[in-house]
Amino acid sequence: MKLADTAHTTRSWRIHEVAGDFDIEDVWALETPGGPDDFARLVKQFSSGDFPAGAPLIVRALWALRWKLGALFRLDERDSGLDSRVESIRDRLPDDLRDTPTGPDEDWLPFTPIYRLDDEFAAEMANSTMHGILHLAWVEDGPGRYRGQMAVLVRPNGRFGRAYMGFIKPFRYLFVYPALMRLIERKWKAAS
């Protein structure tokens, strides 16, 4: 379920300390009911790399098209990414966040983990169009009940980046996010 931006902004997440110049693109409640200690399981599930492989054909096709166009227009070249076009958010971290584990056994490509806490995780990616952050959190959903929450934060790269983000928005809302939310819920239930 899509949430208002305030579901992210009113919480005292540590990401606010280092990503104040990013726009909130989306905030989602994840159908991942659990207890107070289940956040690590959610992070592990996200790093499993089943998206978009486990998504419907239309989403896989859109994903493949995006990577083909990215190669054609050189959107994802090494010099357009982290530590070349943009500085990694890891460089902004206070010392206590800099020393948190990010999970060496997890494959987050195309994202790079930034930090991990007991109830919060952030990873980033950058290309010619934007610098983005995937923020996962574990929120209380009633006495002793918790669920995941996902926020997508972006800093578009100029006019082209803003135009690109505007162009892909309908595809994200019509196809990508619904498929992603169903996949997250299905995998969570299957593992429970």
Image: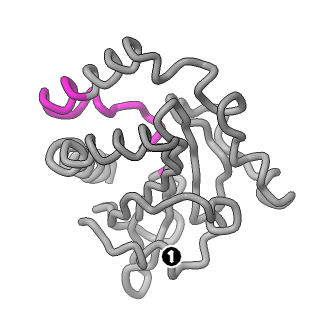
> Image quarter for residue 70?
top left
| Residue sitting at the far right | 95
Q: Nearer the viewer, residue 61 or 96?
A: 61
Image location (x, y in percent) of residue 3: 31, 71
Count of numbered marks:
1
The colour scheme used here is: one colour
Q: Is residue 100 magenta?
A: no
Residue drawn at the location 60% of the way across and 71% of the way down: 13
**Residue most toward the top?**
72
95 relative position to 136: left or right = right
Q: Which residues are magenta?
A: 43-62
* Residue indicated by mark 1: 9
Position in image of residue 14 (x %, y %): 66, 67
Say what amino acid the circle numbered 1 marks. Thr
Looking at the image, residue 149 lies above or below residue 186: below
Residue at (60% x, 36% y) in the render: 112
In this image, 21 relative to 50: left or right? right
